[in-house]
Image (spheres, rainbow, N blue to C red):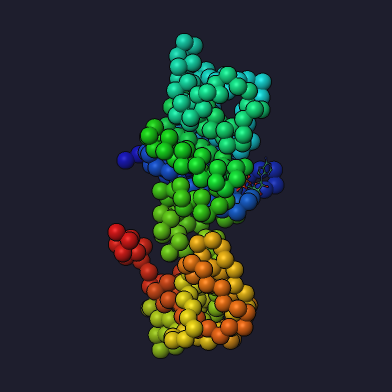
Amino acid sequence: MTARLSFKHIAHQYDVQLALQDFSLDVAAGEVVCLLGPSGCGKTTTLRIAAGVERPSVGQVEIDGSVVAGSGVFVPPEKRGVGLMFQDYALFPHLTVLDNVKFGLHQHPKHEREPIALRALEGVGMTRYAQAFPSVLSGGEQQRVALARAMAPGPRIMLMDEPFSGLDNRLRDSVRDEALSLIDQSGASALLVTHDPEEAMRMADRIALLRKGKLVQVGTPQELYYHPVDVEAAAFFSDINRCGGTVSGGLITCPLGTFPAGDLADGTQVDVVLRPTAVELGRGGVGVPATVRRARLLGEESLIEIDVEGHEGLVHVRVKGTWLPAEGTSVRAAADPERALIFADGVLASNGSNPADIAAVNE
Ligand code: ADP
Ligand code: MG
């Protein structure tokens, strides 16, 4: 099957900055892919290249199997059938909400524009503001209108650059869910940029992790979370606890516990990475002895920072519910070997958990 949107070995050079290198990615029909990475890693550049507002220095972009950029071809943005929702792609202040949405419909015959625009506004629950000007709307309402404007022409591909980052938490969740369901209903594919791993996991069928202009890993949220390619990728999704160890007799021993070494040869130097939820705390029983330094309630979870002998820095543990032991409390910390991520030469070598197994458990 041809991909709806396809990047083939794209590189992009600004004056002095190489913003993207050998970037290849396919987005299938109806798929939502999130481009995730820290600020400056090349996310916006990728989206601008897909939209046609930037020409790639090297490589090719295809939409439904046809070249739209590269090999001497360049199809302008308005001919690509893409919808844009960019951070800095604000509504026109001097146009009403309805006219803002109609503006995106200049390819449609004049008499069709208003009914299509009204339907799009209905889709985001903004019909009653049709004659209002953007300045009277809240941030969330403005984003809803921007979404309606982008979706009204019925794009096959939605390109969204951190469209929810200006909204506060609660509002963000609802606008995000609304956007996702509209995209779903329309059958469009979406490439969504975010620097927020939780947003990516919430929205994406697949996540493409970028670092310094290079694609580091592409996969489902479960694959990236449970099988991060390297320590940095693991650290992008949560706080991590990390300790070094050496394989001996098929085992790795570090201050946080003893872990199976898989196929790694004796003598291999490894990093053991444990997410804060991969460590259990108890008053007694199994685990290494530790001392509580700080405990804080985060809402549904408690964050407990502990001192473990031989481990540099505090170990962060998250437990469900409220448990706030006093500073100085003696506890035992038991790391779940199934959830230990073992990296050799900086690359994931083994872990006990398999996303398929985890999915099966959750079914
Ligand atoms: P992101 O969206 O992930 O924050 P960008 O794609 O905006 O990253 O930028 C990638 C790199 O290219 C950064 O180093 C940025 O400074 C640089 N860059 C972006 N736009 C331009 C531009 N118009 N001219 C020169 N350099 C740019
Ligand atoms: Mg950006």
Vertical arrangement, residue 146 with respect to residue 132, above or below: below
The C terminus, quarter of image: bottom left
Q: How far across and down, in percent of the image, does residue 226 sit?
A: 43, 64
Answer with the quarter of the image where residue 58 lies: top right
**Residue 184 in view, yes or no:** yes
> Residue lying furthest top in this view?
111
Which residue appears at 63% of the width and 51% of the height? 39
Q: Nearer the viewer, residue 257 or 57?
A: 257
Residue 78 shows in this picture: no
Q: Nearer the viewer, residue 266 or 119?
A: 119
Q: Residue furthest right?
A: 16
Would you place residue 249 above or below residue 149 in this image?
below
Give the x, y percent position of residue 172: 54, 44
When asked about the image quadrant of residue 250, the answer is: bottom left
Question: Quarter of the image containing the N terminus?
Answer: top left
Which one is nearer the viewer's eye here, 242 or 93? 93
Determine the residue positioned at 55% across, 29% down.
145
Q: Position of residue 138 (x, y in %)?
A: 62, 34
Q: Residue at x 62, y 42 (%)?
A: 166
Q: Residue furthest bottom?
A: 249
Q: Left of 140 or right of it: where is 119?
A: left
Count the marks: 0
Q: Is residue 215 above or below residue 349?
A: above
**205 lies left or right of 139:** left
Quick check: 154 left or right of 214?
left
